Amino acid sequence: MILLFFACAQTDAGFDTSADDTGATVATVPFGAILVNEVMFDPSLVDGDFGEWIELRNVSDDAVDLEGVILQDDDAAGFLIEGSLPVPPGGMVVLGPSADSAVNGGIPIDYPYSIDAVKLGNEGDTLTVVSGGVTLDTFTWDATVFTVAEGTALQLSPTVSDPDDNDAVGAWCLATAAYGGGDLGTPGAANGACK
Ligand SMILES: [Ca+2]
Ligand SMILES: [Ca+2]
Ligand SMILES: [Ca+2]
């Protein structure tokens, strides 16, 4: 019976998202509030095991907390955001496998995760963001369709703020601003315009 109880409390991904460490219920993030805004899957100045990163943007008018949100790519277990990770309206958070700016390409990471949980494919991958069993956003890139370049993040056009609209190839472009050691992207800051 105990095993059955735990099985029921878990999502399909196998994460228990029903409560935080204190036992308090974790609020779910409403659909349409959070989307994948920028992805660095192929850093050139540092190894991807340290220098990949994912930027999520709050496109709603309300603050949200990403505690309990699950991120997955297309071939690994993914990870559950543990502990409070607030995002103000219009704000962004950056998640990556290393919070050490000395080895991650010089970026401030708001939330570190294991590279074994999410490893972003250079030739293509799918990133999925789930809260309370609801898929908030998926973003799939494929190097045969998207223009990609080593050391350059793929950024969502700042004019796009809908998790369905960011599925379109034309909604994305290569970042042009340098960060940290010189790779291109705007981790934690507004994306540049896509021309
Ligand atoms: Ca990679
Ligand atoms: Ca999407
Ligand atoms: Ca950005």
Image: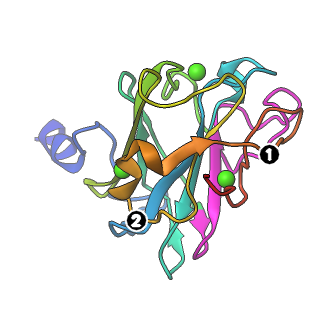
Q: Examine the structure image and report whether residue 174 is included in the region drawn in magenta.
A: no
The three-letter amino acid code for the residue at tag 2 is Val
Quadrant location, the N terminus: top left
For the point 54% across and 30% down, which residue is it? Answer: 147
Could you say where residue 190 lies in the image, as x and y percent from the top left?
A: 69, 61
User: In the figure, residue 90 lies in which quadrant?
Assistant: bottom right
Report the side of 15 relative to 182 (left or right): left
Could you say where residue 153 lies in the image, as x and y percent from the top left?
A: 65, 37
Q: Examine the structure image and report whether residue 89 is included in the region drawn in magenta.
A: yes
Q: Earlier in the sequence, mark 2 or mark 1?
A: 2
Report the side of 90 relative to 66 (left or right): right
For the point 18% across and 40% down, which residue is it? Answer: 7
Image mark for residue 177 = 1
The three-letter amino acid code for the residue at tag 1 is Ala
Q: Which residues, given as a range, are shown in magenta?
A: 86-111
Total marks placed:
2
Q: Is residue 129 visible?
A: no
Image mark for residue 125 = none
Find numbered disc 2 in the image and state the secondary structure of the residue it sits on. loop
Could you say where residue 39 lies in the image, as x and y percent from the top left?
A: 58, 39
Image mark for residue 26 = 2
Could you say where residue 138 lies in the image, as x and y percent from the top left?
A: 36, 45
Report the side of 154 relative to 126 (left or right): right
**Which residue is most to the front?**
195
User: In the figure, residue 158 lies in which quadrant?
Assistant: bottom right
Residue count near mark 1 (Cα–Cα under 10 Å), binned few <14, some 14–19, many ≥20: some
Find numbered disc 1 in the image and state the secondary structure of the residue it sits on. loop
